[in-house]
Amino acid sequence: MMKLRLDYNNMMEEFVGEYGLSKKDFEKIAPKFAPAAAAMKEKRANGAMDWRDLPHNQNEVVKDILDYAAKIRDEVEYFVLLGIGGSALGPMAVHQALQHPFYNDLPRGKRGPKFYIADNVDPERLTYLFQVVDISKCLFNVVSKSGATSETMSQLMIVKKMLESAIGKEKAKERIVATTDAKVGNLIKIAADEGYKTFIIPTGVGGRFSLLSPVGLLPAAICGIDIKGLLEGAAFMDELCNEDEVFENPAYAYAALNYAALCKGANICVMMPYADKLKYISDWYVQLWAESLGKKYDNDGNVVNVGPTPIKALGATDQHAQVQLFAEGPFDKFVVFVGVDKFHEDIEIPKIFGDMPNIGFLGGHTHGALLKTEQMATEFAIMKSGKMNMTITLPEVNAHTLGQLLYMFEVATGFMGELMNINAFDQPGVEEGKNATYAMMGHPGYEEKKKELDGAPDKKKEYMID
Amino acid sequence: MMKLRLDYNNMMEEFVGEYGLSKKDFEKIAPKFAPAAAAMKEKRANGAMDWRDLPHNQNEVVKDILDYAAKIRDEVEYFVLLGIGGSALGPMAVHQALQHPFYNDLPRGKRGPKFYIADNVDPERLTYLFQVVDISKCLFNVVSKSGATSETMSQLMIVKKMLESAIGKEKAKERIVATTDAKVGNLIKIAADEGYKTFIIPTGVGGRFSLLSPVGLLPAAICGIDIKGLLEGAAFMDELCNEDEVFENPAYAYAALNYAALCKGANICVMMPYADKLKYISDWYVQLWAESLGKKYDNDGNVVNVGPTPIKALGATDQHAQVQLFAEGPFDKFVVFVGVDKFHEDIEIPKIFGDMPNIGFLGGHTHGALLKTEQMATEFAIMKSGKMNMTITLPEVNAHTLGQLLYMFEVATGFMGELMNINAFDQPGVEEGKNATYAMMGHPGYEEKKKELDGAPDKKKEYMID
């Protein structure tokens, strides 16, 4: 069985010195463990964490997705995902991890439709997309749980009109597939009215926990990824996560380490995989961690303004960008390395330039060995500089191990929320900006907000340079 | 004249409240301004900041680059850059900003060679690259100032052998172009021995300040970017940066605001452009800021462990990922928005679904207006949550305005280093990891380091979960 491993030796003061964690630090937070574990169980039982069950309850959904994917895969040349936030970051991370890194460049026989994600309302990007894809050969997957996401729904409005004028209304409806809530919101209503194929995001599954629902599974399946393997890996991790003993449960242990570090003043956590395939795991993780754990109020209504700040990095590339800061900068962060034991391909460095200083020694080694060595060397250097770090290792990157990793991070997020005594499953802080957008765009019912905006203090010329 | 603007109203306590900056905060740091400005002048005069002169002293270099680019552009089908850190981040940022966002997907008549960057030693990525590009039609640009960068030089070794066996030694040497130091290091020696065309990185120009040297200019020119415009924009900004009065000099003002915020405990700065074209500016900026300013020692040799932590974000996308944390989380950060007045293309949202809640209002607006409105709404929301933020605005994204922006950030980095009393131009913190890699890979002369590594305390089983 390929199982991921967690090594947190370098989080401990025995290894990194005074800024590391001690058993005392664990003792301080230990009283929170049992109540947090109990809360996790209770929430799952009460349906407040329906995403926990996605690895187990989707047999029919998976069949529907695979049937649909098999049919559509050869019918269209381009697959365009319209979604933002969790609806884009998850599919992007899975695609990068499990597909050929130059998937779109492969000849048609070796791949499904070319895959594009439109996750912004940048007016240039969408315009330019249609200069390189023929809309008459596109399938659009519009993904929004609420059906009210301005960015995604406005893209749907644009695409619908373009598609209908390109291939006619009847054919167009076969080229839009909606992933949304079963009952609530505009999108399910539009899909029913127009006759779009739909896939359902279960009620208790929020955007950033939706990767293992059709949000992530449909794009993966259309591009040819083993979605059953992904779910099996998640199910395997779910079993490990049923353990109540914190340091025997990888997700709980990961959260406890993060929490202990945060309590010690390390308010920044770096997610640094050492494999190009895992690069976008960091982007997905940043949303998961930041949006779940950055909160103004705790569960008792106190103003707390808490939240660790997650950072994206990539090894070895960031050794030449961010590692200087990680090593020599303040003791305000720790690094989570994600390594891989075995790459699917390797490549040998030829034995040339043998007499050249600092490069001759490279000949005869492989790139895989060089990357792995650089990872170990960076762990060592970060440790030696007194900065905490830990390492998660995947035996190899495949659907099963990726399912484990993603699910582990999701459970860890929930447990971290319990330790911090905040609600990890809402995002009230995005409402203000959304309402201000509504007001400025003339949304009916937001006249009061418009007045507030108009009444904001005028900006001062002295604080501008132009 | 298209000139960028800086608006820092929302950095001030009059707008954001108690966690904002006050005039007193400026008074506190003001004594550092004159010495810092003097140091900048002195260093420039002494050749310690040769990158400052790149906008002015490259007429011949530019001619050479343009001649070479014109010749090679039609001769090859693929242009592969081998470089890491500053050698990759700058070219990537410029390409994304000034090229078609789906450049590689355009028909050949509308673009130069397809552009790929190999900036990691991931063994899978390089193997897979040659499954989609025909090596006999590639030009490789190997970029390393020192000629000792393990990642880049090992790629060169691999590529050289493959290329020679594909097209023969004679032809191969026309398909490798080196960008490196004029005299020092392996790469200039190899280039001379093998007969590679070379472009020179001037001596006083470090990796992360090399974007306006041939490091950035050659790839840009080969892909068809207006490199003269880029340099003219930088030259224009250089004039603005000659101003000694800090708050009339955009780069100095930007640095002073960052420094004042850092002194107030905001150890994290978010770089958040609102345009897909500017997305990779954040990646380039993160290296520039993190590697320059994250330092263990100050200029007097005291251990200080300082450095703000830069964060990558993108609007509107990150409103659905990181903005929750920025708005509701701790008062440990501020946001730098980078906006655009005018997009090159816009796209209208059709007037459909008029009766649908929260989406009907969208019809009739453009995507450009929606994006711009969301930017203003997010600025407002972040301000209202009491978090500092400022906005840099480009009239439009073109070579000239981009040149201004990049050069402004570079000068700001230098000035910030002076305010912090650290050396912004070295990176001693990456040596430990490099030496550990050498030792583990069996590099002659690193036997002592190898012993140190072998003698490191054994990891404990109790701190592992597997």
Image: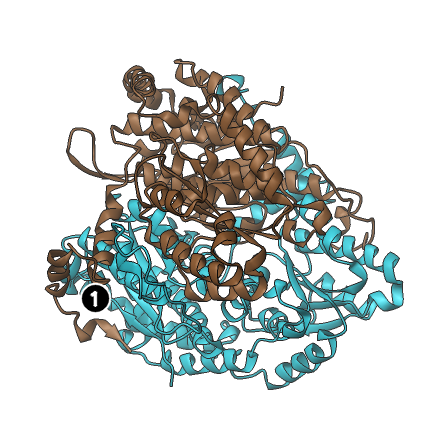
Chain colours: A brown, B cyan
Residue A46 lies in quadrant: top left
Q: Is residue B404 visible?
A: yes
Is B26 on the left or on the right of B396, as rendered?
Answer: left
Q: Residue A41: horizontal and vertical position, in percent?
A: 33, 16
Residue A284 lies in quadrant: top left
* Amino acid carrying mark 1 in the image: Asn
Is A381 on the left or on the right of B237, as rendered?
Answer: right
Q: Residue A408: horizontal and vertical position, in percent?
A: 46, 27
At a point 53% along the width and 31% down the height, the residue shown is: A64
Residue B417 lies in quadrant: bottom left
Is B99 on the left or on the right of B256, as rendered?
Answer: right
Instruction: Indicate the secondary structure of the residue bearing disc 1.
Output: helix
Q: Nearer the viewer, residue A373 or B451?
A: A373
Q: Nearer the viewer, residue B153 or A68?
A: A68
Q: Residue B278: horizontal and vertical position, in percent?
A: 45, 64
In this picture, is B445 found above or below B103? above
Count the numbered circles shown: 1
Quadrant in which the C terminus of chain A is drawn: bottom left
Residue denoted by label 1: B9
Q: Is residue B424 visible?
A: no
